[in-house]
Each structure stands twice: as structure tokens, then as C-alpha cells.
Image (cartoon, rainbow, N blue to C red):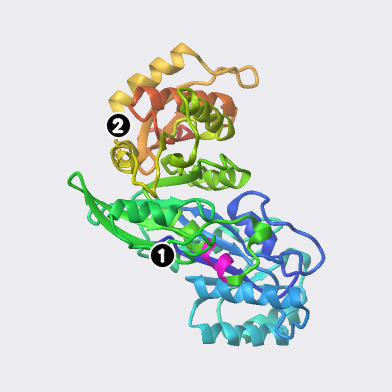
Amino acid sequence: MSIPVVAIVGRPNVGKSTLFNRLIGKRQAIVDGQPGVTRDRIYATCSFDERSYLLIDTGGLELDAKEEIAVQMQRQTDLAIQEADLVLYLMDARDGLLGIDREIIQRLYRSGKKILFVVNKIDISPSQQALADFYALGEPFISISAEHALGIQELLEAIGQQFPHQAPSGQINEEQEGIRVAIIGRPNVGKSSLVNSFLRQERMLVSDIPGTTRDSVNSYLRFNRRQYILIDTAGIRKKGRTEQALEKYSIISALKNLQTCDVALILIDAVEGVTKQDATIAGYAYEAGKPCILVVNKWDLVEKDSKTMASYIERVRYELSYLSFAPIVFVSAFTGQRVFTIFPLIETLYDQYTKRIPTGELNRISRQIIQGKPPALYQGKKIKFYYQTQVSIKPPTFVFFVNYPQGIHFSYARYLQNQLRSLLGMEQIPIKIIFREREKRIDKLNKGTG
């Protein structure tokens, strides 16, 4: 089951990047008053009501574009539409429905994609004529202000209604078909060679030319009585080097498979060491909450002594400190050296990733952790922990009910995560903690129902 892809499309300067930032909950896309600021597609995960979507911000559509940069932008937007399961077509309330909007809408109709029509900037007092234009379109639309967060809840609910059969995040049952393992990394680090080594056959096209794999490919393997789905993804390049449209298109596929995998193998070139792009790719996996194995490939090409491996591990841990819990394995996909030591690690991580903790045990261990190091006071008041419960797996997610959720400092939240991982047998995976205020008790029968 793939994560749905939602593309924000519209002509220049209608607020696409502002909406993108609003939906993902952080400022990632560049926003500017001048049209055409977003020239490349930007991707991020948007989560709502325990469901996740891969959101794409696109450049402004100009059907009569003649300059090379503008033409490239249109190609990128066309690719985003092609990949999308749903298109949000964004319009400007101040301008009304323009002729170019009608042309683009007809183009979207021909694509056969699901479309949600969205009218932005309703906070700027649009004219009655402008609003009448949108009703004349003959399609329902949602009115929002991306800048001021008006109508965003309604929009998110409308997006969810387009995917009624999507399973909540972390609750997709893939045990029937196998453990999904995404193999990610920069171009030419040996991803396809590793899959071939696993399968002992030339299943993937292998080449020294970076970018050979453009589409993610699934291979099935049974090992140690468990079924695995190996996903060989396209290499994720630096933004400045993704000039070819097909290369940019492949990034969507790689990120989609990362979002739906159970374990990510992050390949690192042993000769080159950890690069900035490796750190970026590892960050994608970390933000997605995925268990990771850091696979140092081409180990056969490194001159070694008794201290080489320990020194290398120290450098990897320093460069990727946020993945301090991730196992590291040294292999050679070319020779097959130690590649099958990866599968016991995958099995261990998957078992931790799907582990459920009884509520009584969780509360007992949590009390032990909190009593050992209570949180700091919040505005002079003591933070009280009432009870804890696990609400989901993939990753294991725990809700802590407290009196002041906003008073939990991020450093204390990290302390709780580290302690829980250690004491619950989840040492090698990320976990998630949510702090909520305990609901106030309602007097029974409204104080006797009078």
C-alpha cells in the first residue's frame, strides 16, 4: 500500500508555497511576494488524523512559457501531476477565475486526476464578482487563507475524504506479503549491486554510471523462514544536480517507498565516507520515523588494520549523531562479503518496530523513569504524569497524559525516549512520544441530573 501523493498546482503567486508550509507545519518552501519563486518541486510529509500524505509544492504554471527556466518549471509541474493521486488546484480570491485558470483546469481534467479546487486569500476581502466567478466554475471549492490558517481544517478533511480506504499511519498490515526493506542512498553507492547480491542473480541493472535506476523496483526474497520485499530506489542527488526531469521524478518514488517501508538500509560508500548528502538522506529516514541500518558498502576497497573499523564507526556516529541507535554493518555487495548479516538485523529491528507493551508494564517503567529524574517546574508548578498508553506501532507511539503538556522541555522528552527505548527493548529503533492534557472528569449525570 503506497502513501498517497498530493500535488499543489496553480498559476504563479497564488500562495502555493504558503499553503505547503501550512500543511506540513513548518517553513520549508521559500515564500516571496514575487511570482515564480518556487522553480523546483519540493516534497514533504503531511500528516492529519493519523494518516500521512506525500505533499508536493510546484512552480507556477504559465501555459505560454518561452524562457528556458519557465519551460523547465512547467515540465516539473507536469511530472508532479503525473505522479499525484490528488491535485489541489489553488486560485486567488482577489483575482477571481481567470482565463488561464480555465485553461489549466481543462488540462487537469484531461489528466484524469482527482482534483480539489481551493480558493486562497479569502482574508483580503475579495470582490463579490470574484467570488461569483468561482461559483460559475460549476465545481465545489474550499475557501482558505493559507497565511492565516483559515479553512485549513476543512481542507485537510476534504483531502482525507479522497482516500477513504487509506489505513492509518503505522497500521498498514504488510505482514501478509513480507517485511518491506527500502534500500536508499546517493547514486552509485551500490544499491542495485546489494539487491543482486541478496538475490544471487542479476535482478537489477548495475552500472558505474550514476542514476541508472530511475524507478523503484520490488524484489521478493525468503530468508530464514521470513518473507522480505526489497525495494531498490533511485539515487537521491543533491538538489543542484537534479537537472534532468527524470531524475527529479525518481525522487518522488524514492521518498514514497521510504514512507511505506518497515526498515531502511542507508548505503554509504566506504571509500568516500559520510558525505553531506548521506546525512540529508539519513535525515529523510529519521524524520519518517523508520528503523535504519547504516550499511557501509565497498568495504573490500578500503585498506585496513586492526583499528580501521572502530575508527570508521566513530566517524559515522559523529556525522550521523541523530541515528546513534542505528546498527552499522560493513559489507561488500560486489564480493558478497557479510551481506547476509544484514537480515538478522532487519528481523530484530522489525520485531522492535511492531512491538506492543502492556499498559501496566508501560506505566510501571514510566514511573521508574520519571521518579529517577522528574521534569523541571513549569511556571513554578509541578508537572504531574497521570498515566501512559501505547496507541500504535510502526513506530511504537506512546501517549503521556500530563497536566501541562506545553511544559515538557524537548530535552526532557528526549530523555524519556532514550530511557523507554532502553527499558522496553527498543534500543535500535526510533519511538514517538505524544504529551496530552488529561481530560477533565465530567460529574456523573450532571451532579445527579437535578
Circle 2: is it few (<14), some (14-19), or many (20+) Cα within 10 Å?
some
* Kind of residue at badge 1: Leu
Q: Which mark is residue 311?
A: none
Q: Nearer the viewer, mark 1 or mark 2?
A: 1
- Residue occupied by mark 1: 205
Residue at 40% from the left image edge and 44% from the top image edge: 332
Residue 247 located within the stretch drawn in magenta: yes
What's the magenta region?
A: 246-251
Can you identify the residue that label 2 sits on? 357
SS class, disc 1: loop
Q: Position of residue 106 (x, y in %)?
A: 59, 87
Residue 173 shows in this picture: no
Q: Residue at x 65, y 57 (%)?
A: 239
Q: CA distance from mark 1 to mark 2?
A: 43 Å
Q: Position of residue 192 (x, y in %)?
A: 41, 57
Rendered view: 182 above or below 129: above
In the rendered view of the protein, which quadrant contains the C terminus?
top left
Does the magenta stretch mainly form a helix, a strand or a loop? helix
| Whether residue 374 is visible | yes
